[in-house]
Amino acid sequence: MAQYLVWVNVKVDKFGHATYNYHLNAGPVDASSVPVHPGDQVAWYVQVYNSSNGASQVLPYQLTFANPLVFGTGSVSVPAGGYSPYLQVINLPGNKSKYTLSVTGISPVSDPEIIVVDNGFRKRQAVAPSVTISWQQPTHGHPNGVMTYTDSSGQHAFQPPPYALPLTPGSDVVFQVQPAAPFYVQFPFDPNHGPQTPFLGYPGNTISGTNQNGGVESTDQLQVAHNPDPTHPIFQFYIVLQDGSAQSNTFDLSVAS
């Protein structure tokens, strides 16, 4: 998995017309067309330079993706300007996909490219075939608890949307809660989905934790379905204690075909 920072310099002339220059990591490499692989992560930094007064500033901007399957989202807004969150490539939609950068008060907009390359996708999975998703119950300072996931490369912080944890058909997933307490995993109803969870044998909205092992409560081992819907790859979920005393934040899973 690789990380790319697309550094965008927007130059506004005295007539208010904008030109855009894209560079990888603020270096000399052109990034108006970025080749990425499934599992790679991409973020943007946008800086506006006004040639009339020589001032540089960051302004609110939005990225809109022609194919939302690339990152599992159709758009990302950055209201404070500057750095966007990192987005993870979760699918292989084709050779090229346009996206639009719209900066508040700047005209025209820009339409660069993301090129998703098939370079042994199955050998470059972002997440190992076996994944454990763990929720640490709320503590002082973490009113909604802390969500992490563990794969063959170790434990990682689970990022909120627009990040989506990529899973592949056939992967095994286990949900855990610490300290041990009866819980369930809730998948909010989405009329665009057939099955409401991405797992075989669980077409409903809820999966219960039923197995206690020491101080951990967990679900059974769940297998990701082999035939995901490519038009709706994102599955939202959150974890709730059975007694209703605590609930996690909402996170996203995505299933790449």
Image: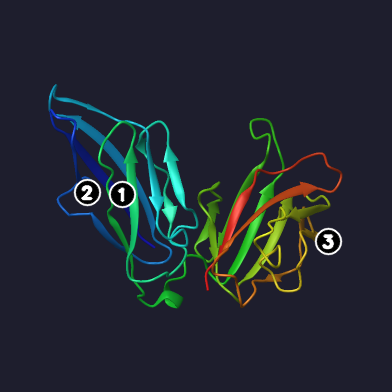
Q: Is residue 5 above or below residue 129?
A: above
Where in the figure is residue 39, as x and y percent of width and height? 43, 63
Q: Which quadrant holds the N terminus?
A: bottom left
Q: Residues within 10 Å of mark 2 (few under 14, many from 20)?
A: many
Question: At x 79% / y 54%, what residue is drawn?
Answer: 184
Instruction: Give the total of numbered labels.
Output: 3
Marks 3 and 2, the one that precedes in the sequence: 2
> Which of the 4 quarters of the picture holds residue 201?
bottom right
Estimate the spatial distance between the alpha carbons at disc 1 and disc 3, rounded to whole Å. 42 Å
Where in the figure is residue 257, as x and y percent of width and height? 53, 74
Question: At x 50% / y 51%, what residue is drawn?
Answer: 163
Q: Is residue 134 left or right of residue 121?
A: right
Estimate the spatial distance between the alpha carbons at disc 3 and disc 2, rounded to whole Å. 51 Å
- Numbered mark located on residue 22 in the image: 2
Residue occupied by mark 3: 210
Q: Amino acid at mark 3?
A: Thr
Marks 2 and 1 in Cβ contact (< 8 Å): no
Question: At x 61% / y 50%, what residue is drawn?
Answer: 251
Residue occupied by mark 1: 5
Estimate the spatial distance between the alpha carbons at disc 2 and disc 1, rounded to whole Å. 10 Å
Q: Secondary structure at mark 3?
A: loop
Q: Nearer the viewer, residue 214 or 227?
A: 227
Q: Is residue 121 above or below residue 233?
A: below
Q: Amino acid at mark 2?
A: Tyr
